[in-house]
Image (spheres, helix red, strand yellow):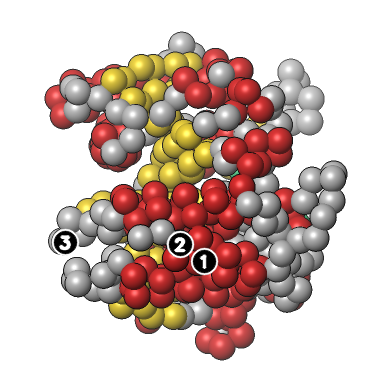
Amino acid sequence: MTAPYSLLVLPGDGIGPEVMAEVVKVVDWFQANRGMSFDVSHDLVGGSAYDTHGVPLADETMAKAQQVDAVLLGAVGGPKYDDLDFSLKPERGLLRLRKEMDLFANLRPAQCFDALADFSSLKREVVTGLDILIVRELTSGVYFGEPRGIHDDGNNPENEGGRVGINTQRYTSGEIRRVARSAFELAKRRGNKVCSMEKANVMESGILWREEVQWVHDNEYPDVELSHMYADNGAMQLVRNPRQFDVIVTDNLFGDLLSDAAAMLTGSLGMLPSASLGAPMENGRPKALYEPVHGSAPDIAGQGKANPIACILSFAMALRYSFDQGDAAAELERAVEKVLADGARTADLMGPEGGTPVSTSEMGDRIVAALSTRT
Ligand code: NAI
Ligand code: MG
């Protein structure tokens, strides 16, 4: 038995609890079969927390999140909470977690499972075997920089409409270096290759970005292959030949766009995991929050239709990045691949050829069964 890993499970709203129930089956399997021990606690976030505590994230839950090895979150939000005051909205619970844990590196893998290659927006031969990881800086850049706002432009006769909208792209070298370090560390466990994307041709913050990423490479990770690319070219390369990449590291704005574009290379929203990592804690593990990319899907909530794979693959990321169980993570990913290859499909994965979809819990059971057939 390894020392127990502490895991805080926050199922949230809508399909969140449905997909999380399937992750719990997987966690139990690893405890029973792979000598791992998880200290799992469950708590509330989002609308479910609001219903109980009157806030989307209770202080005690926040404190717990700061202490555990990893937080696993389902999804938050729903029409029931649409009219709440901004500060009480379910999303605020998630934003508070990200902010107070200072999760500066957002990891979005784009991995193409062979059985689903026809779901890609690209040709099968372009995406077969695709396995890339986009690392997006999450706490700084143009979404947060000052000054910002909408101002009156005085009586400027050359400005029809008379207003100015301002946002500022601002990065410190420290902010760039820490996310660059995350990218290089991740690359060492994968294909050992980092491509950094900015627009150093037109933005000073991009020049600093390029120089600081290069600095971290030269001083700390000389053995990882580093290249630089302008982000607009990066967007073209992602849809032309995405397999040329291993890890891509980029700023908050470009990362937002590039990670969403990359997501569509692989198909359904129900398949996409993510991780957000912060600084290392005392035990050397990074602060970490794992969650599917999708939301609470109120249109299908409570019907057993949700695809649990995005959440299950988020747990695979936790195994790999928080618990150093890379083999177990790969084992889980292979189980997902096998179940898909065997033809199991939740409703979101039904192609035009039709068929009978499996339910959320049946998909979870099949993945656990696929794990069990391995020794
Ligand atoms: P959504 O991701 O919840 O749903 C978009 C579409 O994809 C829906 O048709 C849904 O049925 C489908 N879908 C999503 N996940 C699926 C899964 N696992 N299996 C099968 N189908 C799936 O995004 P939407 O509709 O824009 O937002 C719904 C609610 O979720 C809103 O309250 C929104 O604020 C919240 N939201 C929460 C997020 C989070 O917790 N991180 C992220 C995005 C939205
Ligand atoms: Mg986005």
Which mark is drawn over residue 167? none
> Is ligand 1 closer than 8 angstroms to the Cβ of mark 3?
no
Name the kind of residue labelled 1 in the image: Ala
Q: Which residue is mark 2?
A: 373
Q: Residues within 10 Å of mark 3 (few under 14, many from 20)?
A: few
Considering only order in the chain, which callout, 1 or 3, is on the residue closer to the N terminus? 3
Left or right: 90, with 284 as reference point: right
Query: Distance between the Cα atoms at labels 3 and 2?
Result: 34 Å
| Residue at the outermost bottom position | 52
Q: Residue at x 78, y 31 (%)?
A: 161
Image-quadrant location for residue 363: bottom right
Q: Residue at x 56, y 84 (%)?
A: 54
- Circle 1 SS class: helix
Residue 103: percent from the left, percent from the top?
37, 53
Which mark is drawn over residue 369? 1
Residue 129: percent from the left, percent from the top?
52, 31
Residue 247: percent from the left, percent from the top?
40, 31
Instruction: Give the quarter of the figure containing the C terminus.
Output: bottom left
Q: Which residue is mark 3?
A: 283
Q: Residue at x 28, y 59 (%)?
A: 323
Left or right: 102, with 372 as reference point: left
- Circle 3 SS class: loop
Instruction: Give the quarter of the figure containing the N terminus.
Output: bottom left
Verify CB contact (< 8 Å) between mark 2 and mark 1.
yes
Name the kind of residue labelled 2 in the image: Thr
Q: Residues within 10 Å of mark 2 (few under 14, many from 20)?
A: few
Nearer the camera: disc 2 or disc 1: 2
Nearer the camera: disc 3 or disc 2: 2
- Circle 2 SS class: loop
Considering only order in the chain, which callout, 2 or 3, is on the residue closer to the N terminus? 3
Left or right: 120, with 316 as reference point: right
